Structure formats: C-alpha cells, structure tokens
Amino acid sequence: MASDDIAQLADALSKTHVGDGELSYKGLGMKLDNAQSVEELVHEIEQYQGLRALRLEGNTVGVEAAQAIAKALESKDLLQRCYWSDMFTGRLRSEIPTALRSLGSALMGAGARLTELDLSDNAFGPDGVKGIEQLLKSPSCYTLRELKLNNCGMGIGGGKILAEALTECHKQSSALGAPLRLRVFIAGRNRLENEGARALARAFQLLGSLEEVHMPQNGINYTGVKALASAMRHNPELRVLNFNDNTFTKRGTLAMAQALRHLRNIQVINFGDCLVRSEGAVAIAAVLREGLPILKELNLSFGEITEAAALVVAQAVMDKPLMEKMDLNGNCLGEEGCEALREIMQNMDKGDMLASLSDDEGEPEDEDDDDDASDECTEDDEDTDMVKENGVNGKEESPTKPKSSLYLCCFISDGVLKKLLSGSVLQSYCFLSTLLVKMGLLKGEGKMKKVSVVPGQLLCLEHAVRQDYFPCHHASLLHTFMSKNTEALESCSSARERLRAALEKRCHDQF
C-alpha cells in the first residue's frame, strides 16, 4: 500500500466517531479495495466492545474489503443497526451481491439481531436484492424494525424477491411466537412498477405492523396503487404514507381514500404528483371530513386538481387541530384560486375564515327570481310550489292532493337519495362527485356519455338540498362548484338559479 494511501486512511480514521455503541466512518470518502486497505478499520471494529451500530455510508467498499470487514463482524452479536447506504460507488454491479453476501453471512454467523438496515443509494438492482435475500430470511432479521432501500434500482424482479424474503421472515418468526414487526419501509426510486408493488402489497398485508411507508417514484399506476391501498388497511398503526410521483388517477385515489378511512393514526399523507385529479381530491376531502383526526401534513401538489376541488380539500382540513402543512401547489387553480388558498393556509388556526372564503367566491343571487323563469319551466315551477307545500317527506299524502310529475319525481328521489347519503361519508361524496361530472361542473376521467340536463332535474335537486337528509357539507361543495362554473347549465338558467339560491340559503343557515 502506498505511503500516501496509508496517510490518507490514517487521516480519515482519525475522524471516526465512537460512542453510544456506535462506530461511524460516515462520509469519509474512503476507497476500500482490499484487506490491506481496511486493516485499521477492521482492528477498530474488533476492539470495540458492545458494538451496536456501524456506519459505513459515504465510502466505497470492494469485495475483498467487505470480506475483511465481515470477518471482524463475526463476533459482534450485539450489532443492531447497519447504516450501509452509498457504500459501493464506482463498483461493478457484479461485485455488490458478493460483498453483501459476505457481510450478511457474518451477521448471521454472529447471531446479531438487527433492528435497522439501511442500504439506500447503492443501485445494486435485482442481483443486489439476492445478495441480502438470505439475511432477510434469517433470524438476524426477525427483529427488524426499519428497512431502507431507497434508490437501489431493484426493479420488478427485485421487488418480488424482497417481498418473498419478507414473507418468509414473517412466517419463520411467527412460528417462534415473535412475528416480524417491521415499522418503517422505504423503497423510493426503484422502478417497482405494478408487479413489484403488488408483490410487496401482499407482504405488507401479512405484516400488519407498518407505521411508515415511503415508495415515491416507482412507476406504479392505479392497479398497483389499489393493491397497496388494500394492504394499507391492514396496517392500522400507519402514521406516514408517501407515494409521491406515482400515477393514481381516479381509481387509485378512490382505493386510497377507502384505505384512509381505516387509518386513524395517519399524520402525513404525500400524494403529490400522483395525478389524483379533482374527483380523487373530492374523495380525499370526504375522508378528511370523516376522520384522520391527528393529520399534520397533506400533499396533493401537481395533481391536476381544479380550483373548486382544491377549495373543498382546504375546507375539509380546517378543523384539523394539528394540521401544519397543506401543499396544493402546481394544480389547475388560476390566480384567484391561488389567492383563496393562500388565505386559508395563512389562517388555518381560524375556523371562521371558511365562511368568509365561501362568500368571496361571488355574490349570491336573490332567492325570489321565480318571476324570471322561462316559459318552458312554468309548469315545473308550479309543481315545485306544490312540492314545497306538501313537503315530500316520504309520508303518504292526502288523496285529494294532485300528484304532479315533478312531485312524484321528488318523492322517488327522496327515497333513493336518503339511502345513498346515509352511508359512509366517502360513499356519499363519491355519489356527489359523479353528480358534479354529469352536471358538467367537474371534469371526469375517461370517456363518459354526455347527459343533457333539463330543468326538471335541477328542480328535483333544488328540493333535495333543502331536506335534512342532504348534508350541509355536500350543499357547500355543490355551491362551491356552481360558483366556480358560472357558465354551466346555461340551457336551464332559471332552474339553475333556483338551485343556486337554495344552496346559498342552506350554506347560510349552516353558519
């Protein structure tokens, strides 16, 4: 070994941090190619009594060097935490699995019981996962609590191998009466895609112990997202959910919204750059209304969410006492929408700001504009007066009262809507989201047959929003979307204004 290299290594080792059971060579930038290059490092490891944590990140370790370090670890049965991220820079991809197997075998031979394993930023691909496969299945990982494999390029194949290893680890540890209870899983930027995500979802569902899941930038679309959502429901202690920069679309977001209903401990949700879109945002708003009492952060940025849907989300988080951050940046908000959201975020500790923001969206029309109704709506208007007079509360009315077509439509719709709106908040919001799409107030996903809205339908809806079974939150949401889409329903302008007035009154009465 050249004298310059020895001097460089000696200088690096002089910066080694020792204490609290941890031996750290973090960020020293050492190039460790062979056994000779790690002689002093190995000596320090061997001499360290009660070694519990070893930090090797930020150095580059070759096969021979790894084997020498492994030899020193064979007696370290108390080792619990291995911080080995960014440890193979400049190494051939074929070298890494061999180095990992050497280190893993040493840990297994020593009888170590790991609680944390960090191999992030090593770009070892599926073969690298094979290098740690036996370690993950072994008793050394039965106690594992945190597994960090961010930016490792695992791909679909690596994701499947990892899932199988975690499943086997759980099976074997459960047989001993102490099942694997993994709490933190980090695997962003790994190109897992749908197949890898589905394989891991099956493992997650089996574990049921996860508290943090970070899987950003993995090329997962709605089929993979739905599998992950189903798995998350079986992990009730989840606190952090980060799927940033995958592709949810409506179907994936609805699945995640369903899962969130079962996760009362969630504190951080990061669905930024996930294309949740407006319908998905409305579904998440429904879950926010219904639960998530200790939520602190919500990221729905760059999701193609319109101004009205964004405002609905903002309104839904207003009553969250621990809320610290809401990110809706990069959506289709417009200047006015951005300004409205800034106000909300600046005043999140003032619940009374919600009402004033709703009022700022435009002055409501006067309620008595029946005289301005067009001739085509005259008969419907008379029917509406009859509906108001009779009440249409589901009770049998006097046979002397004539039953007009609109009266009967309202009577029937009452029964249907009561059932639809008496279910979960998410179910009723999904119904309302579909209604908004059909009314042309919200852009839906995929091809949808265009429906012509006629005045009678809006008059039935006007009747419905006045009833107790129609939630105030839904009336507020509908009012928000109508205020933001003033040109919609032009062919039924009179009935539209009657509905708008009814919504305005309902929202006013709420406050």
Image: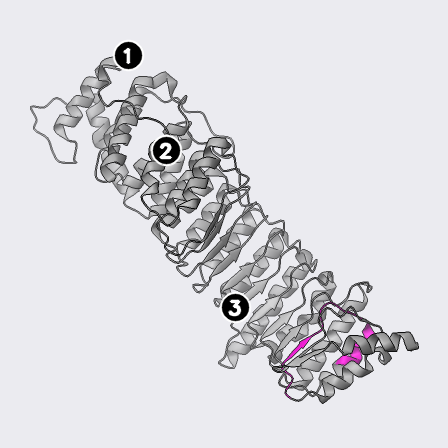
Give above or below for 213 relative to 461: below
Q: CA gap, disc 1 to disc 2?
A: 25 Å
Give the class, few, some or many, for how many residues have Cα within 10 Å of label 1's Cα (few <14, many ≥20): few
The residue mark sitting in front, 1 or 2, is: 2
Between residues 166 and 175, which one lies in front from this camera angle? Answer: 166
| Residue at which label 3 appears | 183
Name the disc covering residue 338, or none: none
Give above or below for 458 relative to 114: above
Between residues 73 and 153, which one lies in front from this camera angle? Answer: 73
Give the class, few, some or many, for how many residues have Cα within 10 Å of label 2's Cα (few <14, many ≥20): many
Say which label, 1 or 3, has the lower sequence index: 3
- Residue 283 seen by the camera: no
Residue at position x 27%, y 37% in the image: 416
Name the disc covering residue 480, or none: 2
Give the magenta-colored segment's residue range.
50-69
Q: CA gap, disc 1 to disc 3?
A: 64 Å
| Residue at which label 1 appears | 374
Between residues 285 and 346, which one lies in front from this camera angle? Answer: 346
Tell me where residue 284 appears, x and y as whole percent.
43, 46
- 285 vs 302, left or right, is left
Confirm or deny contact between disc 1 and disc 3 (CB under 8 A): no
Say which label, 2 or 3, has the lower sequence index: 3
Q: Secondary structure at mark 1?
A: loop
Q: Secondary structure at mark 3?
A: loop
- 501 vs 266, left or right, is left
Q: Amino acid at mark 2?
A: Thr
